[in-house]
Image: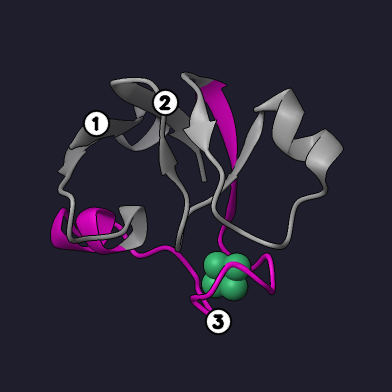
Amino acid sequence: AFEVSIPALDVTVQVGESQSIVQALAQAGVRVKVSCEQGICGTCLANVLEGTPDHRDQYLTEEEKADNDQVILCCSRARSARLVIEV
Ligand code: FES
């Protein structure tokens, strides 16, 4: 599990092994716009303020993934214990 925080909304959630970041945020009442939910369309893209994503999408280019400043919330996870994002 890892933690995702959205300072602008004053929200922090734990993302369990069996759920996505989008699902964990939904449980806290934060609805992220999604479409494909498969890491393809880019609808759920968010900015990363802190932490390192574990990119599992096919939307960002390899170069963008290496920058680690954006994350696809429907399917990517975290390499760090905590991700701070801006949606
Ligand atoms: Fe399509 Fe996340 S909803 S990439």
Residue drawn at point x = 52 percent, y = 46 percent: 87
Q: Which residue is mark 2?
A: 84
**Of callouts 2 and 1, the N-terminal one:** 1
Q: Residue at x 50, y 74 (%)?
A: 34
Q: Is residue 56 left or right of residue 13?
A: right
Mark 2 in CB contact with mark 3 (< 8 angstroms): no
- Please name the residue that numbered disc 3 is placed on: 35
Please state, as top left, top right, bottom left or bottom right, where the N terminus lies in the image.
Answer: top left
Mark 1: secondary structure: strand
Q: Secondary structure at mark 3?
A: loop
* Mark 3 neighbour density, 10 Å: few (under 14) some (14–19) many (20 or more): few
User: Is disc 1 surrounded by few (<14), some (14 to 19) or many (20+) residues within 10 Å?
Assistant: some
> Residue placed at 18% from the left, 51% from the top?
17
Whether residue 32 appears in magenta in the rendering, the answer is: yes
Magenta span contains residue 38: yes
Which of the two labelled residues, at mark 2 and mark 3, occupies the earlier sequence position? 3
Work out how far the residue at label 2 is from the one at label 3, CA to CA, in angstroms. 22 Å
Residue under the image location 50 percent in, 23 percent down: 52
The three-letter code of the residue at mark 2 reads: Val
Q: Which labelled disc corresponds to residue 62?
A: none
Discs 2/1, front = 1
**On the rendered structure, is 66 left or right of 78?**
right
For ligand 1, tell me if the residue under mark 3 lies within 8 Å.
yes
Q: In the drawing, what numbered circle is on residue 3?
A: 1
Above or below 21: residue 13: above
Q: Residue 80: x, y in percent?
A: 37, 20
Report the front residue among 5 and 83.
Answer: 83
